[in-house]
Amino acid sequence: MVVRTLECFSGSGLLHNAIVMVSPEHETEFQRVLNAYFPDTAIQLCHGGAERQDSVGLGVAATDADTEIVVIHDAARPFITPESIQASIESARVYGAATVAIPTVDTILQGDAEGYMLETPDRSCLWQCQTPQTFRKSVYLDALAQARESGHIGTDDASLVQRSGAQVKLVPGTRFNIKVTSPEDLLLARMYIRTDDIG
């Protein structure tokens, strides 16, 4: 999945600046695979941290000093389109922060701790968050510093940035941009790969 995801970014001309976060015990294997699939591109590997935002922070810190825009993406989303990547970059340049997302088509129920329904939010205002989440580097680093100072641990980077007071632009993605986290997701991903008309 990492290779397929990186190939999506290769089509956008961003592979030469890619940084992949890995655990130390898997670094050698990752390097071997990346060298095999991308022999002409030096992809930087960095060790992650205890939490997602720690890993992202280490990755952002490893970028070149003159980097203005950072594009943060889950390797578990191997069907991101070049159009969505570019739209997130353009929006981040204009607004400072952007995330790819799709309007929800399902009714979302809010429940309590015991599993009883509390209310039904208006789905016309609800979006399903995806990645990439793209930021001006300075905006992201400011949000990360605020989170560290307050001891806040965020579940995603767009929420972390929004919590800092910055506005995050929603960039429409596609429903093919699934996150592969379960055996059912993997089955669906294999079906997508066998289909000629998607990435």
Image (tube, rainbow, N blue to C red):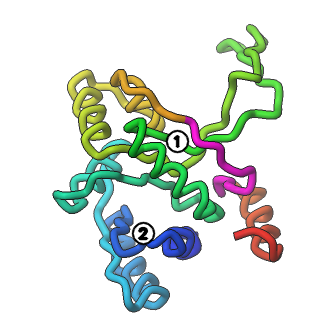
Looking at the image, can residue 52 be seen?
A: no
72 or 179: nearer the viewer: 72
Q: The C terminus is located in which quarter?
A: bottom right
Relative to 138, 2 lies left or right: right
Relative to 142, 128 lies left or right: right
**Vertical side of 88 occupied by 98: above or below:** above
Relative to 19, 61 lies left or right: left
Q: Amino acid at mark 2?
A: Leu
Q: What residue is shown at x 47% (from left), y 32% (from top)?
A: 168
Q: What residue is shown at x 29% (from left), y 61% (from top)?
A: 47
Residue under pointer 1: 99
Report the residue that reaches farthest toward the left: 65
Q: Amino acid at mark 1?
A: Thr
Q: What residue is shown at x 31% (from left), y 39% (from top)?
A: 140
45 or 10: nearer the viewer: 10
Q: What residue is shown at x 78% (from left), y 68% (from top)?
A: 192
User: Horizontal and vertical percent for residue 164?
Assistant: 33, 24
Q: Is residue 160 magenta?
A: no
Which label is found at residue 14?
2
Magenta residues (range): 170-181
* Magenta stretch, overall SS: loop
Q: The N terminus is located in which quarter?
A: bottom right
Looking at the image, can residue 132 be seen?
A: yes
10 Å neighbourhood of mark 1: few (<14), some, or many (≥20)? many
Q: Choose top left, top right, bottom left or bottom right for residue 92.
A: top left
Cα–Cα span, label 1 and label 2: 17 Å
